[in-house]
Image (spheres, grey):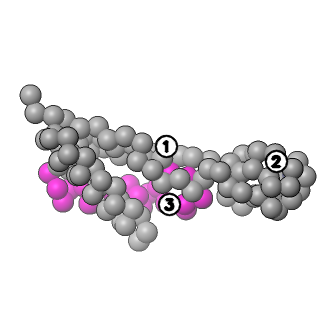
Amino acid sequence: MHEMGIVDGVLSTVRATVQHEGATRAVGVTLRIGDMTEVVRESLDFAWEVLREEDPQTAACELTVEEVHPHSVCRACGNEFDHDVRHLRCPACGSGDTRLVHGRDLDIVSVEIETPD
Ligand SMILES: [Zn+2]
């Protein structure tokens, strides 16, 4: 499952942040995920619930996901447009020569940590 690998990578970054900041544990992480990545939200949440338990530093860490809808620019006429995952043609001129600007994002926006008093 593709989502297991994603969650594993995110948790490594979260653990590294906790250690780097001298924190006790992470309490929240926000991800930005593009629609074009085809990440299945249910699978992601499941992988998160399972894998975060493996380390006390991440066991109580809540996952928040910001969805990013696809946005492209047309190489033929320069039009910028939002679209869904199946409609990539430029609505202004009908060209299929477009470049995706947003939609394949898979970024960690922020990690919330708890520091010792
Ligand atoms: Zn166009």
Residue 53 shows in the view: yes
The stretch of residues the image draws in magenta is: 33-56
> Dot 3, how many residues are within 10 Å of its Cα: few (below 14), some (14-19), or many (20+)?
some
- Circles 1 and 3 in contact, beta carbons < 8 Å: no
Q: Which residue is mark 1?
A: 66
Between tags 2 and 1, which lies in front?
2
Tell me if residue 112 comes above or below residue 58 in the rendering: above
Residue annotated with mark 3: 39
Q: Secondary structure at mark 3?
A: loop
Tag 2 secondary structure: loop
- Earlier residue among tags 1 and 3: 3
View extreme (bottom): residue: 1
In the visual, does 116 lie left or right of 72? left
Q: Residues within 10 Å of mark 1 (few under 14, many from 20)?
A: some
Measure the alpha-carbon separation of dots 2 and 1: 27 Å
Res 38 quadrant in image? bottom right
Q: Earlier in the sequence, mark 2 or mark 1?
A: 1
- Left or right of 74, for residue 104: left
Q: Which residue position holds label 2?
A: 78
Residue 91 visible, this angle: no
Mark 2 CB within 8 Å of ligand 1: yes
State the residue in front, 111 or 55.
111
